[in-house]
Image (tube, grey):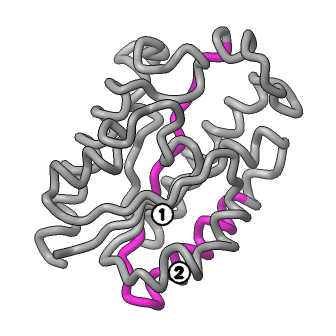
Amino acid sequence: MKRIICHGDSLTEGTDIEEAYRWPSLLQNALGTEVLNTGIGGDTTAGLLSRFSTDVIPRKPDAVILMGGTNDFWWDLPVNNVLANLFSMAYQAQFHGIAPLFGLPMPFDGDRAIKQPYRPPEAGYDNLLVKVKSLGQKLKTAARESEIPVLDFFNLYMDDDHQLRSHLFLEDGVHANRQGHRLMAELAASQMGSLFLLRI
């Protein structure tokens, strides 16, 4: 059986969603292959990189989905730092015969998020969204040049008028609800089925 690892933060881990309804679990059901979830809530891309050699490489997956950056931007870290960390993991994956994909971090509902009791972003929600968008744009361009597939989870949460599909979020405005996870799994399954599983 082929193996895929989803390596990320809480958007991958599936905050406040039962394991069976998280997008990596749904992806496993859709593809009929093993999918491991190594998402850790609150982790930055530096954290993902630091545990890549223990959480991903020894498990010898056929593919790894890398998604992070939101927590980096929560602390107002530079976009280029996130890109460097993501590509470092991607190149390590390729060196070990693992096919990398990038998942674009999704947007969020700032009106809901600002009402939550947790610590707000260092430079505010508007700045956070600007950086998440910037990462998506830069990551798409750099990934295309490196021939690394991208799963566009960001635009999955936007409608045809570029408005946020707020009904896909939990009450915290940051994390996906069951419906959001289902759509993420469907997108990943569709793209991975055509790009990877037919040839790995």
Label 2 element class: helix
Question: Could you tell whether 135 is left or right of 157 in the image?
Answer: right
Q: Is residue 44 above or below residue 26?
A: below
**Residue 91, label in figure:** 2
Label 1 environment density (alpha carbons within 10 Å; few <14, some 14–19, many ≥20): some
Q: Amino acid at mark 2?
A: Tyr
Question: Where does the image place residue 38, in percent across and percent down from the top left?
Answer: 50, 60
Q: Residue at x 28, y 33 (%)?
A: 182
Q: Nearer the viewer, residue 122 or 60?
A: 60
Q: Residue at x 64, y 72 (%)?
A: 51
Label 2 environment density (alpha carbons within 10 Å; few <14, some 14–19, many ≥20): some
Q: Is residue 17 above or below residue 104?
A: above
Camera-nearest label, 2 or 1: 2
Question: Could you tell whether 38 is left or right of 72 in the image?
Answer: left
Image quadrant containing the C terminus: bottom left
User: Mark 2 or mark 1, which has the lower sequence index?
Assistant: 2
Circle 1 is placed at which residue position?
A: 143
Question: How much space separates mark 2 and mark 1, taking CA atoms?
Answer: 11 Å
Answer whether residue 188 is magenta in the image: no
Task: Read off the magenta span.
Answer: 82-110
Question: Could you tell whether 42 is left or right of 17 in the image?
Answer: right
Q: Quadrant of residue 100?
A: bottom left
Q: Amino acid at mark 1?
A: Ala
Q: Residue at x 65, y 49 (%)?
A: 69
Question: Where does the image place residue 132, in percent across and percent down from the top left?
Answer: 64, 39
**Residue 154, label in figure:** none
